[in-house]
């Protein structure tokens, strides 16, 4: 009995078990509330984020999910303005907006072939691995003969330029976007050595070594990547004489297109180092100077 003479309620023999999906339902409801009220409605904000021509009233607690943003706002007082500026020209206003929205609620549906590279750049900077994975998948699946040159410029590393001797596709150097750059370089290499040749071989016209589509894809390649592809055992041109003929045609076309620059490129058909069969080697050397000779009379 209690002091008032009223009997205390007896404890339940067993606690009532909540529905199995109650936590999931609560988390979903909370996420929806935070996204709609916090991001879309910009209510109860304690920081203003400005980037490009966009200004958003957001929340430091949510922004801190990004290691990059957490570092920037660490010393900012509530009500402050955070001005974001980027040295990476690949990061766009749309990509930053998607990356910020993703901190409030997953936004993979906003990633497409047109913005995937920019989103990958922003997500990698912000430390949003799940969004970067989505963007990487979209980027990798979009590689084609029409845009492979753009991809090479975007993620390519010239061994001659970096001085470290890394071949295109090597994992020895990650690049600007970490492991994503290394994976994309390998994706480009796989496209040139496997996907594109397989697509061409599926067509009934001619053989791979004489197909103009393979030639068109190889002619603009940087020298180191061109050499790597032509010499690779993965290039499905097994007969070395055919590969040699293809290499000579490509080098002639590269010379006409000005791709060789100040170098003279050549293809050599020679015995392998172990003496077991033939191999094609691509070489280059500086062009000989054709400076005029002046006769000096004493």
Image (spheres, rainbow, N blue to C red):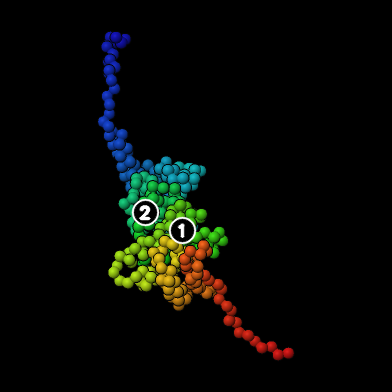
Q: Identify the residue at the far right of this view.
A: 298
- Residue 131 seen in this snapshot: yes
- Residue 57 seen in this snapshot: no
Residue 223, position as x, y percentages in the image: 49, 68
Q: CA distance from mark 1 to mark 2?
A: 17 Å
What residue does disc 1 label? 169
Q: Secondary structure at mark 1?
A: loop
Identify the disc placed on residue 137: 2
Q: Nearer the viewer, mark 1 or mark 2?
A: 1
Q: Is residue 73 above or below residue 205?
A: above
Identify the disc placed on residue 56: none
Badge 1 or badge 2: first in the primary sequence:
2
Residue 211, position as x, y percentages in the image: 35, 71
Q: Quadrant of residue 292?
A: bottom right
Q: Quadrant of residue 289?
A: bottom right
Q: Secondary structure at mark 2?
A: helix
* Residue at position x 30%, y 10% in the image: 2
* Residue at position x 51%, y 55% in the image: 173
Residue 56, position as x, y percentages in the image: 39, 50
Taking depth in this image into account, of 292 and 277 the one nearest to the observer is 277
């Amino acid at each position: 009995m209690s002091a008032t003479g009223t009997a205390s309620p007896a404890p339940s023999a067993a606690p009532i078990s909540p529905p199995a999906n109650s936590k999931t339902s609560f988390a979903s409801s909370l996420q929806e509330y935070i996204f709609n009220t916090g991001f879309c409605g910009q209510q109860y904000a304690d920081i203003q984020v400005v980037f490009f021509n966009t200004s958003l009233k957001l929340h430091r607690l949510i922004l801190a999910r990004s290691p990059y943003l957490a570092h920037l706002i660490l010393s900012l007082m509530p009500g402050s303005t955070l001005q974001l500026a980027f040295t990476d020209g690949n990061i766009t206003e749309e990509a930053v907006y998607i990356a910020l929205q993703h901190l409030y609620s997953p936004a993979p549906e906003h990633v497409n072939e047109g913005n995937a590279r920019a989103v990958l750049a922003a997500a990698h900077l912000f430390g949003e691995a799940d969004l970067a994975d989505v963007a990487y998948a979209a980027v990798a699946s979009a590689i084609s003969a029409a845009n492979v040159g753009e991809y090479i410029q975007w993620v390519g590393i010239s061994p001659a330029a970096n001085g470290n001797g890394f071949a295109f596709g090597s994992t020895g150097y990650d690049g600007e976007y970490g492991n994503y750059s290394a994976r994309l370089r390998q994706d480009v290499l796989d496209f040139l050595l496997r996907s594109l040749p397989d697509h061409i071989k599926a067509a009934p016209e001619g053989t791979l070594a004489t197909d103009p589509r393979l030639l068109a894809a190889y002619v603009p390649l940087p020298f180191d990547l061109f050499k790597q592809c032509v010499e690779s055992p993965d290039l499905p041109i097994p007969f070395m004489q055919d590969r040699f003929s293809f290499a000579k045609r490509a080098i002639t076309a590269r010379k006409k297109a000005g791709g060789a620059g100040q170098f003279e490129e050549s293809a050599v058909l020679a015995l392998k180092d172990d003496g077991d069969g033939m191999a094609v080697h691509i070489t280059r050397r500086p062009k000989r100077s054709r400076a005029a000779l002046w006769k000096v009379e004493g």
